[in-house]
Image (spheres, rainbow, N blue to C red):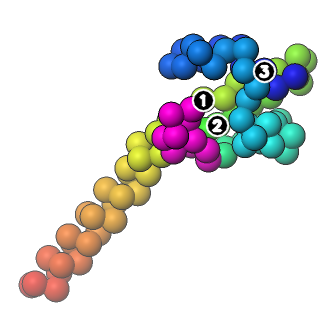
Amino acid sequence: SNTIVVSPRSPEAVGRLAGERAVAARASGAEGIYDGLTAAGDPVITAFRKSSLTNWSAHVSIPLDLFNAPVRRSIWIFAAAGLAAIAL
């Protein structure tokens, strides 16, 4: 029924319908990753898995900035190394 049954960070969401992206992700397969927004409008990346026994799904989100941090850090490191190489 696409109803939220547990939401530790947003208990007010319990009993409400899941967002469009969560519903679309569930319809697309048994597991996956999708991007979306929290109820407060913050960008997140979400991984989910749907049970074949119960048809329930668990969705776990982290802030998009946290998800992208390793890539951003690597870009800065390579940029610094490139500048150091040019300076030599």
Q: Is residue 41 visible?
A: yes
Q: Is residue 80 left or right of residue 37?
A: left
Q: Quadrant of residue 61?
A: top right
As drawn, 28 above or below 6: below
Report the amino acid beneath label 3.
Thr
| Disc marking residue 12 | none
Report the amino acid beneath label 1.
Val
Instruction: Describe the element under mark 3 as helix, strand or loop.
Output: loop
According to the picture, the residue beneath numbered tag 3 turns out to be 3
**Residue 71, image x, y percentages:** 40, 57
Quadrant where the image shows the N terminus: top right
- Cα separation, mark 3 vs mark 1, equals 15 Å
* Residue in the picture at 75% in, 41% down: 20
**Residue 28, image x, y percentages:** 85, 45
Q: Which residues are magenta?
A: 35-45
Quadrant where the image shows the C terminus: bottom left
Report the amino acid beneath label 2.
Ala
Instruction: Describe the element under mark 1 as helix, strand or loop.
Output: strand
